[in-house]
Amino acid sequence: MHNLMILIVIIVICVILYRKSKKVQLNKKPKNIKYPYHAVNLLTPAEKLFYNALKNAIGTEYSIMCKVRLEDIINVKRNANNYMSHRGRIKSRHIDFVIVNCDIRTVCTIELNDRSHNRPDRRQRDKFIREALSSAGIILHEITCRRSYDPEMLKKLIMTQKSQSKSNLTLCMSNT
């Protein structure tokens, strides 16, 4: 019995020492670690062209947010069945552009569709995003990628949302 107690004490001491050594290893950071990352442009050339046209169209009345996570503009209702499954479908998807008013409230969203949106997997993704945004009451404009954009057409597109956010817009302007 005495030998068994000694053996248990030795095992406990070994476990404690092993765990401490693991903690020390985790806390040690190599001095010359090289991470495999590199900087990229936030927007593709086509997105940048559209962004500039959109910026000219809306002026200072609204702001443009680029590549916004879908989960940042819509959420799953807490009491929804399969909450985590529904959340998983929105947490890693992005919207190309979100137009917001001065309160940073979403006025509308814009997806710039290039040829990749003709692929079956992209069509399925686009359908999901369209339905998810619609269920949350958020307008989605899907715009075909072009070599140039008419700022007046873009302005009309955005201004059709103005009546929905007019009270917020008036409030923002009176606070400045």
Image: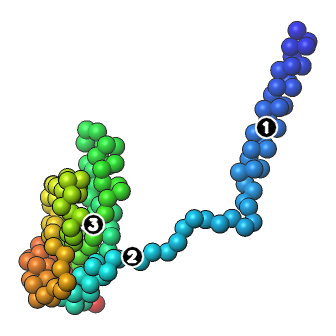
- Circle 3 sits on which residue? 95
- Circle 1 sits on which residue? 18
Marks 3/1: CA–CA distance = 48 Å
Going 72% across and 60% down the picture, which residue do you hit?
29
* Front residue of this view, candidates 100 and 93: 93
| Badge 3 or badge 2: first in the primary sequence | 2
Q: Indicate which disc residue 42 carries.
A: 2
The answer to whether residue 170 shows anywhere in this view is no
**Labels 1 and 2 touching (C-beta < 8 A):** no
Q: Quadrant of the N terminus?
A: top right
| Badge 1 or badge 2: first in the primary sequence | 1
Disc 2 is placed on an element classified as loop
**Amino acid at circle 1:** Tyr
Q: Quadrant of the C terminus?
A: bottom left
Q: Which image quarter: residue 142?
A: bottom left
Disc 1 is placed on an element classified as helix
